[in-house]
Image (cartoon, rainbow, N blue to C red):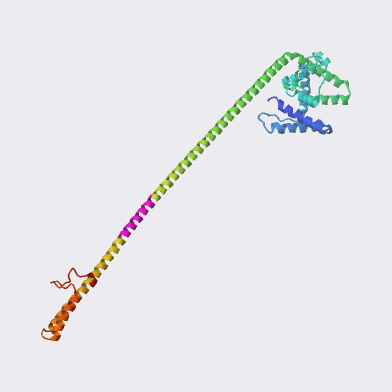
Amino acid sequence: MKRKKWSEMEEQTLLTKYSDLLNSGTLAKLKTREKKFKPIADHVNSVHHLQDPLHFPFRWSWRDVSIKVQNMRHQYLGVKQKIRTSNNEFNWKDGENHWENFLKYKEVFGDVELDITKENAPNNDNNIIELYGDESVLGLGFGIDSEEFENEEEDDEDGGSGEGEEMKKGFCGKRIRMVGGQVLELRDVLVRREEKRREREWSKEKGMLEREERRKGMELCRERRDDERDEEIEIKGLMLEERQMMWAKRECEKRLRLEREFDEERRRRMKLEEKWEEEEMEWRERLVNMQIEHEKQMMQMHADACQNQTNLLGIMARLVFQFFGSANDGLGGGLGTLSAQVLQNLHPGGLNDAGKPDAASPSEFL
C-alpha cells in the first residue's frame, strides 16, 4: 500500500483549523483527543480529499491528526536546529526553505526550545526525531504512534510497578540500537528525500511555468481572436457604410434622373401647349377670316340679288309703260316721258347690253 503522507497544503489547513479552535476557546472545552481532533480531520478532508481526491488521495482520521500534531513538533525542532547560527540566534526566514509551514507552526503553537542535553546525546532517539523531523515519513519502519506512548504511560501510572518501567527501558534500548544500526540508511533516506523535494519543487516550478505559458498562449489566442473579431466587425462596418453610400448615391442619381425627366416632360408639355395655343390661335384667326369672308360673300350675294331684282323691276316697268302707253295718246306720251325719267332715276348707271348694272355704278345704290 502507498504510504500515507501529508501534503503541505493539508498541513496548513490543519494548522489554520487548530488555531481557529484554539483562539475561540472551543479546543479547551473538549476533554478527549477524539473530540479535539475529529473536527479538524473532518475539516481537512472536506477541503482537500472530498474536493480533489486525485491530488489528495488520503482520508485522515482523528488519530492521524493527533499523530501529525506530535510529529510536526519534532519536525519544527529539527528545522530549528538547522537554522541555528549561534546559541541564541536563529535565521527564521530560512526556516520556510526547509519546511513551508515552519513559521505557521510557530505562530499557532509558539516557539519550542531546543534541549541542549538531547543534542549532545548521540544515541538518544528523541534527538534523531528532532533533528530529522517527521519520523512517520522517513519510511524506516520505527515510527511510533503517540497514542501508544500515552496508553503505555497510563498503564505505568495505574500499575505503579517497576516491571512496566523496565519494559519501557528495554523497548527504548532496542529502539536506540535500531536507530544506531540504520544511521547510514537514514542519511541516504534524507538525501533521497531532499532530492525528491527538489524534484517536486522543480516539477512544481515546471508545472507553473507550463501553466503560465499555456495561460499566456490562451490569452494570446483570445486576444488574437478578439482582434480578428474586431477587425471583422470593422470591415463589416466599412462594407456597410460603403453599401449605404452606394445606395445613397444610386438614390440621388435616380432622384436627379427623375427630376430631369420630369423637367423634360414639363418642357415638352409646355412646348406642346404653346404649339397647341399657336395652332388654336391660327385656327381661330382662319375661322374668323373665313367667317368675315363668308359674310362678305353673303352681303355681296344679297346685294347682287337686290340689284337683279331692281333691274328686273325696271325692265318690267319699261315693258308695262311701253305696252300700255302710245305716242299719240297724251297719257301715253306723258307716261312714256315719265317712264324714261323714272327709269333713268331708278338706274342712273343704266344697264349694259347683258341687262346687268355697269361697273361704274355708284356704291350708294347698295
Name the residue furthest left.
328
Placement of the C terminus among the 4 image quadrants: bottom left
Please state if 64 lies on the left or on the right of 244 as rendered.
right
Depth order, front residue of 181/252: 252
Depth order, front residue of 118/101: 101
Residue 41: which quarter of the image? top right
Depth order, front residue of 91/147: 91
Instruction: Indicate the position of residue 219 as horizontal and vertical percent values.
Output: 59, 30
Residue 226: which quarter of the image? top right
Placement of the N terminus among the 4 image quadrants: top right
Instruction: Indicate the position of residue 332 as horizontal and vertical percent values.
Output: 14, 84
Q: Residue at x 28, y 63 (%)?
A: 289
Q: Residue at x 86, y 20 (%)?
A: 165
- Magenta-highlighted stretch: main secondary structure? helix
Please state if 151 lies on the left or on the right of 100 as rendered.
right
Depth order, front residue of 79/312: 312
Residue 90: which quarter of the image? top right
| Residue 155 forms part of the magenta stretch | no
Can residue 97 be seen from the camera position used here? Answer: yes
In this rendering, the answer to whether 41 lies above or below 247 is above
Please state if 366 lies on the left or on the right of 54 as rendered.
left
Instruction: Specify the segment rendered in magenta.
Output: 264-282
Instruction: Indicate the position of residue 157 as horizontal and vertical percent values.
Output: 87, 25
Q: Residue at x 55, y 31 (%)?
A: 224
Name the residue furthest right.
160
| Residue 272 forms part of the magenta stretch | yes
Please state if 174 lies on the left or on the right of 279 as rendered.
right
In this rendering, the answer to whether 357 lies above or below 127 is below
Instruction: Indicate the position of residue 303 as horizontal and vertical percent values.
Output: 23, 71
Can residue 174 be seen from the camera position used here? Answer: no
